[in-house]
């Protein structure tokens, strides 16, 4: 099974992935937890370029770099883990490119999907949990972490608004795969919703 988690930065994806990993491992499943951009050696190098606040790059360059990191991640980590029978839990995937580069940067979701076709090579998630949290709450959670904003986080409120609208549009297009989860409750309450859906899926 290939499961992805999406949403705005700080919505709680990492927290929810850890809770699902614990639940699955308690039940005896083998789990591969991974993230984008990154997850593989070369992809982690590309991640450093993509998130470096000192770099400025054209939107198309950015989209290709995310796709390049994904090509490596799919071939080195995700597909091999699926072939070994592991459950793959991935923090962001193709939908992030559609939302951030397609809607946020204005490249167009379908152009970004086309540019990613060879990178994902048919490797697509069965279920995606889209964690929805008002931007003000997400930025409050990010501040609590005390880390300096990365290049994408620094792109401005209007950009983030387009990204969020993009995620909602993607969920409306594929309601059978993308489950919208209200991420404003406690981590345990949010997880209860994810677990109920996951149990029905598996
Ligand atoms: N990006 C892109 O543009 N195109 C692409 O194709 C891909 C990505 C794949 C990657 O950033 C950036 O790349 C991202 C999109 C872009 N940029 N933005 N913006 P990243 O990997 O460094 O970070 P992230 O994935 O955006 O998010 P994150 O930092 O990992 O946050 P999170 O996983 O969603 O949240 P968290 O770490 O679980 O929780 C944040 C804090 O809130 C933490 O202190 C928790 O303890 C707390 N928390 C979590 N849940 C709760 C609840 N329920 N209540 C209260 N507090 C909570």
Image (cartoon, rainbow, N blue to C red):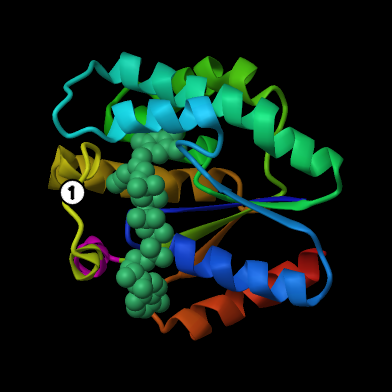
Q: Is residue 122 above or below residue 149?
A: above
Disc 1 packing (10 Å; few <14; some 14–19; many ≥20) = some
Residue drawn at the location 50% of the way across and 25% of the way down = 42
Residue 46 is at least partly visible in this image: yes
In x, y percent, where is residue 40? 56, 33
Q: Residue 185 location in percent, x, y?
A: 40, 82
Circle 1: element type: loop
Tell me what residue is drawn at x 28 percent, y 35 percent. Answer: 51
Name the residue located 13 percent from the left edge and 43 percent from the top edge: 156
Front-most of residues 2 and 44: 44
x then y, percent, for residue 88? 69, 50
Please, what is the dominant secondary structure of the magenta stretch?
helix
Image side of residue 84 versus residue 138, left or right: right
134 up-or-down from 52: above or below: below
Q: Quadrant of the C terminus?
A: bottom right
Say above or below: 14 vs 169. Answer: below
- Residue 184 in sight from this viewpoint: no
Q: Which picture quadrant has residue 102?
A: top left
Q: If the picture is divided into quarters, which one holds ligand 1?
A: bottom left
Residue, x 70% and y 75% (percent of image)?
23
Q: Horizontally, is 145 left or right of 35 in the view? A: left
Where is mark 1, residue-wise?
149
Q: Write the start and end of the magenta stretch as one range.
A: 134-141
Identify the image quadrant of residue 114.
Answer: top right
Q: Is residue 26 covered in magenta?
A: no
Residue found at the very far front of the displayed protein: 41
Write down the quadrant of residue 39 in the picture: top right
Question: In the depicted view, which residue is nearer to us: 22 or 126?
Answer: 22
């Amino acid at each position: 099974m290939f499961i992805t988690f999406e949403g705005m930065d700080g919505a709680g994806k990492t927290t929810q992935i850890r809770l699902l990993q614990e639940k699955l491992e308690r039940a005896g499943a083998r789990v591969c937890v991974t993230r984008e951009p990154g997850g593989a050696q070369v992809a982690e190098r590309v991640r450093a370029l993509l998130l470096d606040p000192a770099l400025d790059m054209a939107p198309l360059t950015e989209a290709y770099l995310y796709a390049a990191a994904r090509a490596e991640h799919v071939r080195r980590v995700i597909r091999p883990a699926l072939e070994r029978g592991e459950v793959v839990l991935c923090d962001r995937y193709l939908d992030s490119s559609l939302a951030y580069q397609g809607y946020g940067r204005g490249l167009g979701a379908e152009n970004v999907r086309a540019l990613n076709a060879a990178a994902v090579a048919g490797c697509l998630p069965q279920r995606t949990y889209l964690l929805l949290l008002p931007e003000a709450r997400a930025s409050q959670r990010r501040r609590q972490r005390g880390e300096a904003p990365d290049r994408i986080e620094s792109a401005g409120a209007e950009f983030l608004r387009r990204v969020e609208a993009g995620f909602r549009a993607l969920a409306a297009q594929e309601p059978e795969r993308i489950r919208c989860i209200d991420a404003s409750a406690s981590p345990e309450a949010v997880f209860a919703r994810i677990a109920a859906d996951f149990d029905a899926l598996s």
